[in-house]
Image (spheres, rainbow, N blue to C red):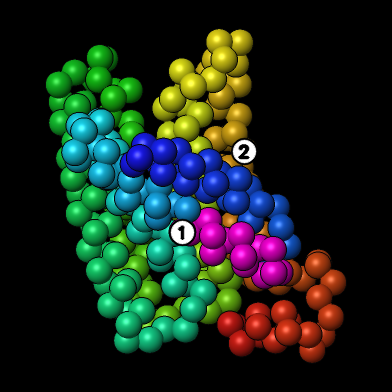
Amino acid sequence: MTLLFHILAGALGLVLGAVALSATKGATLHRRSGIVFVYAMLTMSVSAIMMASLRGVAPAVNIPAGLLTAYLVITALTALRPRTAASRLVDLGAMLVAFGVGLISVALGLEALARGIRTNWIVSIPFLVLGVVGLLAVASDLRLMRSEGMGGAPRLARHLWRMCFALLIAATAFFLGQPDVFPKALRIPALLALPVLAVLTTMLYWLWRVRIKGGYRAVIGDRRIPPGSRLASRYARRG
């Protein structure tokens, strides 16, 4: 039953993640698909952690990946909501989890390299990626707490990259981590890597538009949002 929930939640997360990325940012479809995406990713993460813990399914990788994915979608969601005492506690707890995941993952990656770079460098990559991303996210959390919030482009960028990286983890686990679920004709590494590269490219594209091309207006400015509309007012309030 846990495996079934994991598969269904993962599939739903991949579909809704693609919908949210392609939908008009801030529009109803984007917001609703994004909310369900968060729930799907949390279900997938929790079920992955349960299977890794109770059934011994690659716990060294799956537990940190599940914790980091849950952390990313939770903090991506809170990034677009007003800062309150409750949200600060959530961010603090999530940051501590990400800090632990980051340290442990980096340690495991370095340990794998210490055993032999030539034979274990591929094994170390997942640990090092999870660890570096976790620690970088913690650094971002510290800046957020010290500044008591952020607005405009930084706030939207925080939301975007965390949502996209959670989707990237799910896509990597599905397409590259489980090639046996695909027909033999499709088990071509370069072909299975295309969805993963598509998510990564899309994330970099949106970050470029938000951070370099002109803040949040780079995302909604060319969508012909009528002045004075509810959507325009929502973005105005968010800075």
Q: Which is nearer the N-term, disc 2 or disc 1?
A: 1
Q: Can residue 188 be seen at all in this image of the molecule?
A: no
* Point 32% across, 71% down: residue: 91
Q: Is residue 11 visible?
A: yes
Task: Give residue 81's position: percent from left, percent from top.
Answer: 49, 78
Q: Nearer the viewer, residue 15 or 109?
A: 15
Question: In the visual, does 44 lie left or right of 222?
Answer: left
| x and y percentages locating residue 74 in the rendered image | 40, 64
* SS for callout 1: helix
| Labelled disc at residue 198 | 2
Q: Amino acid at mark 2?
A: Ala
Q: Amino acid at mark 1?
A: Tyr
Q: Which residues lie in the magenta part?
A: 26-39
The residue that mark 1 highlights is 39
What predominant SS class does the magenta segment belong to?
helix
Q: Position of residue 92 (x, y in %)?
A: 27, 72
